[in-house]
Image: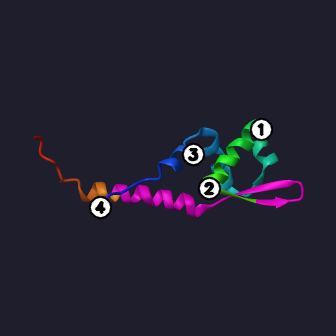
Amino acid sequence: MMTSVDTDLIRVLGDPLRLQIVTLLARETLCTTHLVEETGAKQTNLSNHLRVLREAGVVETEPCGRFTYYRLKPDVIEALAGQFAALAEAARANADTKRACP
């Protein structure tokens, strides 16, 4: 059984600012203005990172007047965690499996 982990999603979440955004959104739904205040990032930089997170399916948007709110999609994070859990389980199950050297 081959266990795989979504490397594209790891790359998306591997950026420190994007991980900070995801961590903040795990606690509450926030608009861009809140995220600028919380992260100290420039608006344009933050918007680019939010676009990457949105395109990767990690966050969803909710328009509210002239603001856009961002919400974390927990199922995506949970699926990635499940992939790592399956990898750890495979390692446990095969701990005594050793291929002979030629």
Q: Position of residue 31 (x, y in %)?
A: 79, 52
Q: CA distance from mark 1 to mark 4?
A: 44 Å
Q: Residue furthest bottom?
A: 75
Q: Are marks 3 and 1 in contact (CB under 8 Å)?
A: no
Q: Are marks 4 and 2 in contact (CB under 8 Å)?
A: no
Q: Residue at x 58, y 40 (%)?
A: 15
Q: Residue at x 78, y 56 (%)?
A: 69
Q: CA distance from mark 3 to mark 1?
A: 18 Å
- Badge 3 marks a residue whose secondary structure is helix
Q: Are marks 2 and 3 in contact (CB under 8 Å)?
A: yes
Q: Are marks 4 and 3 in contact (CB under 8 Å)?
A: no
Label count reads: 4
**In this rendering, would 15 be left or right of 24?**
left
Q: Is residue 95 above or below residue 41?
A: below
Label of residue 85 in the image: none
Q: Which quadrant is the C terminus positioned in?
A: top left
**In this rendering, would 49 be left or right of 43?**
left
Tell me the quarter of the picture where residue 40 sits: top right
Label of residue 58 in the image: 2
| Nearer to us in this view, 27 or 9 | 9
| Nearer to us in this view, 9 or 73 | 9
First reached walking from the N terminus: tag 1 or tag 4: 4
Binning the other alpha carbons within 10 Å of mark 4 as few (below 14), some (14 to 19) or many (20 upward) gives few
Q: Residue at x 23, y 53 (%)?
A: 95
Q: Which segment is the magenta one?
A: 62-88
Q: Are marks 1 and 4 in contact (CB under 8 Å)?
A: no
Residue under circle 4?
1
Q: Position of residue 55 (x, y in %)?
A: 64, 52
Residue under circle 1?
44
